[in-house]
Amino acid sequence: MKLSACIEWIFADEAEAFGDRIRLAKKNGVEAVEFWKWTNKDLDEIETALKETGVELTSFVAEPMIPLTDSANRDRFLRGLERSIQVAKRLGAKTLIAQAGDDLPNIPRDIQRDALVTTLTLAGSVLAGTGIRLGVEPLNTRVDHIGYFLPSTREALDIVRETGRPEIGIIYDIYHSAVMDEDTAEVIGNDMDRVLHIHIADHPGRNEPGLGSIDLAERLRWLFDNGYKGAVGLEYRPVKSSSLTIVELRTLRQATTK
């Protein structure tokens, strides 16, 4: 089980510079890292740290982060996607992350959904031949993202299939899914090939595994048993030191292989 530390939160208390957070990941035996926006990062610093440590960059957000449910944003997003692809090539990331955006007032849901499908379909054409894929991420609307358009993993997978593009998939965040009372096996079903990357955190609190009630080991075991081959993104707010939470995750690693 390869770990990918989201260095927006992991090692943030230990180091201010993102390059140093990458070095701490290496020191703590974490094979990969990820972050959110690239436009607010020192890319030279990050590139240097990745090359120095050999740590992999799994993913980051395709910018701009604007509602893809609004067709007026389509051209701007696709232009930004081209720039994000160039950064991904430079840093070695194979997955970009997109969010649908909030539910737009006074616009019927089916119109927003059609806009999202069309934009993702065109994004697939932009990504074709690059070796990079784009994952749209369902987010919970009960705690962290009230008003978000796409809280359902099942609907996200339906939308992805409608695009007909192999470059388009989902980011499956177990935390968000559990907050929405979803069962991992039920919502993923036979669509594992569309799961580009996964995230974990416990609930309540969105903290490290072991501080909440989510059956993370069981859900992860199902994902790996059913064909998931990617990294596990650590997107939690550590209560203890990040280093200690990494040590404790070894128990979770062992549990997923039983």
Image (spheres, rainbow, N blue to C red):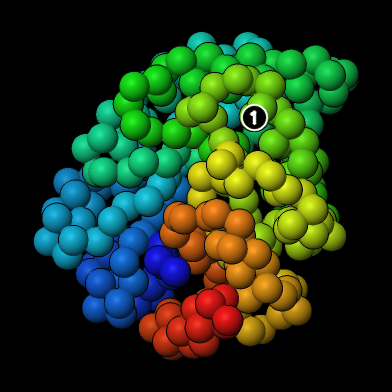
- Left or right of residue 11: residue 201: right
Quadrant in which the N terminus is drawn: bottom left
Q: Is residue 102 left or right of residue 30?
A: right
Location of the C terminus (image quadrant) = bottom right
Q: Looking at the image, which residue is at 28% across and 29% down?
A: 86
Which of the pair 22/106 is nearer the observer? 22
Image location of residue 126, percent across then percent down: 42, 17
Q: Please tell me which residue is depicted at 41% across the width and 53% down the height of the picture.
A: 35
Tell me what residue is drawn at x 63 percent, y 76 percent.
Answer: 217
Q: How many marks?
A: 1
The residue indicated by pointer 1 is: 160
Check the image and report above or below for 111 versus 101. above
- Secondary structure at badge 1 equals helix
Residue at point 23%, 52% (across, down):
46
Q: Position of residue 87 (x, y in %)?
A: 28, 35
Q: Which of the 4 image quadrants contains residue 190?
A: top right
Query: Crowdedness of circle 1 by 10 Å Cα count: few (<14), some, many (20+)?
Result: many
Q: Is residue 102 above or below residue 40?
A: above
In the image, 161 versus 136, the foreground residue is 161
Q: Is residue 151 visible?
A: no
Is the residue 17 above or below the residue 36 in the image?
below
Give residue 68's position: percent from left, percent from top.
Answer: 63, 24
Query: Disc 1 residue type?
Result: Val
